[in-house]
């Protein structure tokens, strides 16, 4: 049996694997481009029903630094900067923590650095919850 791969087969298989990994990463958290009105970002539950589920969240992108908005359970939400305090890399949701892919810093949903090299917490934002949705106060 021939165990060598042609270049074409290698490229095909590695492209399929890479695409699968990217789709998995994208499904972890949706990105939403938002507009800031009167110092607030408003997220409507009708437009984003998954946000009502514990552990679900959105990456909010605007003219300012991106913000993670995460449902931490029992009707509570946390909003933290999506920029690592170590070297300003973009952090990602990874299970029940936020991780920086650049150097491995890990943060909890309250923004606290739980593993370095980052030592400073992420910037946090106040959230206000109503029956209709969540507001992030900037």
Image (cartoon, rainbow, N blue to C red):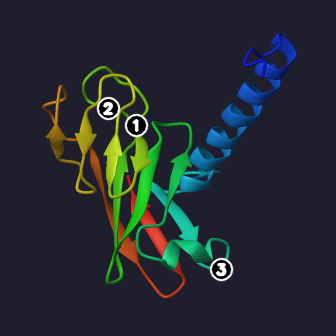
Task: Identify the residue at horizontal 44%, vertical 83% (top origin).
Answer: 130
* Marks 3 and 1 in Cβ contact (< 8 Å): no
**Helix, strand or loop status at disc 1:** loop
Q: Residue furthest top?
A: 7
Of residues 69 and 24, the one nearer the viewer is 24
In-front residue for pair 39/46: 46
**How far is the residue under mark 1 from the one under mark 2?**
6 Å
Cα distance in 3D space between marks 3 and 1:
27 Å
Mark earlier in primary sequence (3, 1): 3
- The percent position of residue 118, horizontal first and vertical second, equals 19, 29
Give the percent coordinates (x, y) of residue 34. 61, 52
Q: Nearer the viewer, residue 135 or 58?
A: 58
Q: How many marks?
A: 3
- Badge number at residue 91: 1
The residue beneath circle 3 is 46
Residue 85 appears in view = yes
Q: Residue at x 52, y 72 (%)?
A: 51
Which comes sooner in the sequence, label 3 or label 2? 3
Label 3's element? loop
Q: Are marks 1 and 2 in contact (CB under 8 Å)?
A: yes
Name the residue: 37% across, 23% down: 102
Which of label 3 and label 1 is nearer to you?
1
Crowding around mark 2 (Cα neighbors within 10 Å: few <14, some 14 to 19, many 20+) is many
The spot of residue 112 in percent (x, y) is: 17, 47
N-terminal-most mark, 1 or 2: 2
Q: Which mark is residue 10?
A: none
Residue 104 percent across, percent down from the top left: 29, 30
Furthest residue to the right? 8
The Cα–Cα distance between marks 3 and 2, rounded to whole angstroms, is 31 Å
Mark 2 highlights which residue?
84
């Amino acid at each position: 049996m021939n165990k060598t791969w042609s270049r074409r087969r290698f490229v095909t298989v590695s492209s399929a694997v890479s695409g699968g990994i990217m789709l998995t990463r994208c499904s972890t958290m949706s990105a939403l481009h938002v507009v800031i009105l009167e110092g607030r970002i408003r997220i409507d539950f009708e437009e984003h029903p998954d946000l009502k589920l514990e552990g679900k969240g959105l990456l909010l992108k605007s003219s300012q630094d991106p913000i993670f908005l995460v449902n931490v359970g029992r009707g509570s939400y946390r909003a933290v900067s999506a920029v690592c305090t170590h070297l300003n890399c973009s952090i990602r949701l990874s299970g029940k923590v936020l991780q920086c892919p650049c150097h491995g810093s890990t943060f909890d949903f309250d923004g606290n650095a739980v593993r370095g090299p980052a030592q400073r917490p992420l910037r946090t934002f106040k959230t206000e919850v109503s029956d209709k949705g969540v507001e992030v106060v900037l």
